[in-house]
Amino acid sequence: MSAYESSRHKKAGNRDDKTVSRNEKNGIRAKARLDGAPVVLTAKKDMRSRRTKRALYEAMFNLLADEDFENITVNDICMAASVSRTTFYVYFEDKYRLTNYCIKELVSDISARSDKDDIHDILDKILAAIDENRRVFQNLLIDGNRELEKILHLEMVGDFVHLLSGHPVMGTASETQIGMRAVFLASGISNLLVWWISGAFSVTKDEMTINLIQILKEIGLIS
């Protein structure tokens, strides 16, 4: 190959390298735009979804503080939340599904604010939340709605599994044995809470706390 041909080949190679480099950069930018757009849109959509659900959650509980559950309509909820009926039905099939969601969120919020290693704190926060929102919880039990009891039970099972794991009273118990005791304890307490609410709070919050703690002391779970 002549010096001229060698030089021309080298320049052509440099142009090709620059073209490839530009194409790669453009491709990276394009990919970033394409890949980034769904992430941004998804994040915005998720944020909007959370805001809408929170608005419906707050609206439902505000209405339950003043109205019996059976008297509350989807229109009432939408007006209180400043949400259209179309938007409501995007997230929930009916007011019953919304109520189930609200109960789960409430119990989850209480659990998140509790000290998982302190059963006294867990029970105190649950009882306080119920006591402060008596009318709401009474209305949630109208028409034999057992969802509150079921959700309280499921949340407490997790709390008791955590408390019992490694607890001296359990010794070398297996996961199955711990799980069975957690279900037993959670069932008892969630039923007592429903009894308390449906009985028009004939027992004070402090009495409930004292008695529940005493029961747990008697079985050796706490000292």
Image (cartoon, rainbow, N blue to C red):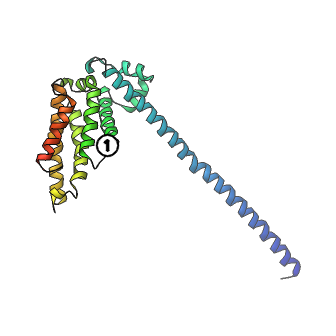
Which residue corresponds to the image point at 54% horizontal and 41% vertical from the top-left? 41
Residue farthest to the right, as pictured: 4
Q: Position of residue 159 (x, y in %)?
A: 25, 47
Q: Position of residue 170 (x, y in %)?
A: 16, 57
Residue farthest to the bottom, as pictured: 1
Task: Give the total of numbered labels.
Answer: 1
Drawn side of residue 180 relative to residue 47, left or right: left
Q: Which residue is mark 1?
A: 114
Q: Is residue 79 above or below residue 173?
A: above
Q: Is residue 93 above or below residue 3?
A: above
The amino acid sitting under disc 1 is Ser
Which residue corresponds to the image point at 68% horizontal and 55% vertical from the top-left? 26
Q: Is residue 9 above or below residue 205?
A: below
> Does residue 193 appear anywhere in the picture?
no
User: Which picture quadrant has residue 190?
Assistant: top left
Drawn side of residue 137 relative to residue 55, left or right: left
> Does residue 49 appear anywhere in the picture?
yes
Q: Is residue 68 above or below residue 91?
A: above
Which quadrant, please, contains the N terminus?
bottom right
Q: Position of residue 99 (x, y in %)?
A: 30, 29
Residue farthest to the front, as pictured: 223
Which residue corresponds to the image point at 44% horizontal and 36% vertical from the top-left? 50
